[in-house]
Structures are given as structure tokens and as C-alpha cells.
Image (spheres, rainbow, N blue to C red):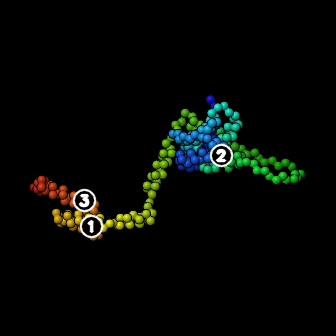
Amino acid sequence: MSATFTATLVLPNTVLPSTDVLMISAKKAMYSVGQLKIDTIETISGVCLSCADYSLDFVPQIFAGETLITVHLTPSKPSDVAQMQLTLARVTALVAERHEPESIVWLDTNIRIPTADFLDAMAPETPQAQQPRRVTAQGESKRPRPTQTAQASLPANVNNSPDAPQKHDAHIQAYEANIRDMMLRNASENELAEFEGDVQDQSTEARLSAWAVSIAVASFSLPLAAPVVIYNVARGEDVRVASLTLGLVGLFATLDVQGTISSLMSFA
């Protein structure tokens, strides 16, 4: 079985990229490394792209207040390790340019490399004009070697470990949170003005219908018709209010015919 090579992009936020955005980034990365014939599939945890030589799995998740995008490269047959690592590095660099992570965890080192340093290492060398060599009498300058500091360990499920549960519904939670924020946001003044304009703009037929129903209510009960007429004059004609009042008149008329109201009055 071929070994799997892993790189993780660490984003300093808790917003998961959507499946469509992740698929576009993965396709562009595959095209950029020369793979034009690829098969794509959306998995329960992310997206998977495969070609003749290898397959790439992109798995996003949220852990400890950060968004992690893990890239798994699996050769389809035994291949040169250095070549596979170079391919993974190129794909990781291309995805990093699009999503702008804070750092990158390379392979299984658990050491976070700043994204700028990683991209500088992957940038092609540009030829420089040859300068004449100058010999100076100064001694060789020595600079202190930078030390690598290990950051907090990543979750066990980053490298497909069965010890920790996978958060497969994180992208669904992010989508629902976005929809909830849009539904609960405050309406702007322009939206309120348009809403009020739609409410006040009624056709002549609707207004005449409201008055016709109000007159029908008045023919049965003047006390119930009076509030409807006042409402039509003060707030504008509303067929719904007039219809509800007509239904109420019909209810009382039915109860009166059946003798229910007389029975109730006898108990008073």
C-alpha cells in the first residue's frame, strides 16, 4: 500500500470554506501542476480529486478556534518519495495563495511554518545578473541560527487517526449560521421604505372589496361593523380584517339560531 503524504493549512478563523470554493481551489491546483484529466467527487468530509498517478483529498475542519484544511496525497502505485513530496508542496502552495493561511504544517512534523516562508521556498529562482566578486578584509560574519519552536499539537484526526471523532458536519453548521445571521439582521431604511410602499399600494378592486364586506357586516350587526369602518378610514382598506369580522358575525348568527346564546344568557 502506498504511503500518504499530508500537509495542513492553518487559518486563524472559524469559517469553513464551502464545498464549491474548496473544489475550485483543488481543481486550479491540479491544473497548475499539469494534471488535466481528473475525476472529482464530494466526500462527507471534503472533496477528493484523482488522476492517473495519485489522488488528493482536501478535508476542512475547525479545531481550537482555527480552521484547518488538510491535504492528503496518496500515490496510486509505488512512486518516488521526493517527487510526491514536491507535488504535494506545489499543490499546497497554490491552495495557500488562494486561502491565505497563517501557517502550514508540513508532513507529520507538527511544526508550523509561516506561510510567507513556505511560499518563498516554493517560489522559482529568478536569474540575477552576475556581479564581480569583491574580496574584503573583514572576517566572516556569523548569524545566530534560528531555532524552530514547536506549536501546540494538532488534533489526532488531522492525519486520519481513528482515536478522535471527525467533525463531518462543521460545514453544515457554518452554512446554517450564515443563513441565521442573514435572517436575523436588521432591515435597512431602503428595505423598510419599499415594504411600507408595497403595503400602502392597493388596487381599486381590493379597496372596493373591503368596503363591500364591511357593508355586509353592517347589514347584520352595526356594533361589529363600526370598528371595521373606522379601521378602513384610519389605516386603509383591508379585506382580511373585514373578512374576519364577517366570519365573527356568522359565528354569532349560527349560535343565535341554535339557541346557544339564549342558554348562555339564562346562566348570567
Binning the other alpha carbons within 10 Å of mark 1 as few (below 14), some (14 to 19) or many (20 upward) gives some
Earlier-in-chain disc, 3 versus 1:
1
Residue 112: quadrant of the picture: top right
For residue 208, the mark is 1
- SS type, badge 1: helix
CA separation in Å, label 3 and label 1:
16 Å
Q: Residue visible at 24% across and 59% down? A: 244
**Residue depicted at x 80% and y 52%:** 128
As drawn, is 237 to the left or to the right of 55?
Answer: left
Give the Cα distance between marks 3 and 2. Answer: 66 Å
Q: Quadrant of the C terminus?
A: bottom left
Kind of residue sitting beneath label 3:
Leu
Tell me the distance, in whole angstroms, between the alpha carbons under discs 1 and 2: 68 Å
- Decide which of tag 3 and tag 2 comes sooner along the chain: 2
Q: Residue 54 location in percent, x, y? A: 63, 36
Secondary structure of residue under mark 2: helix
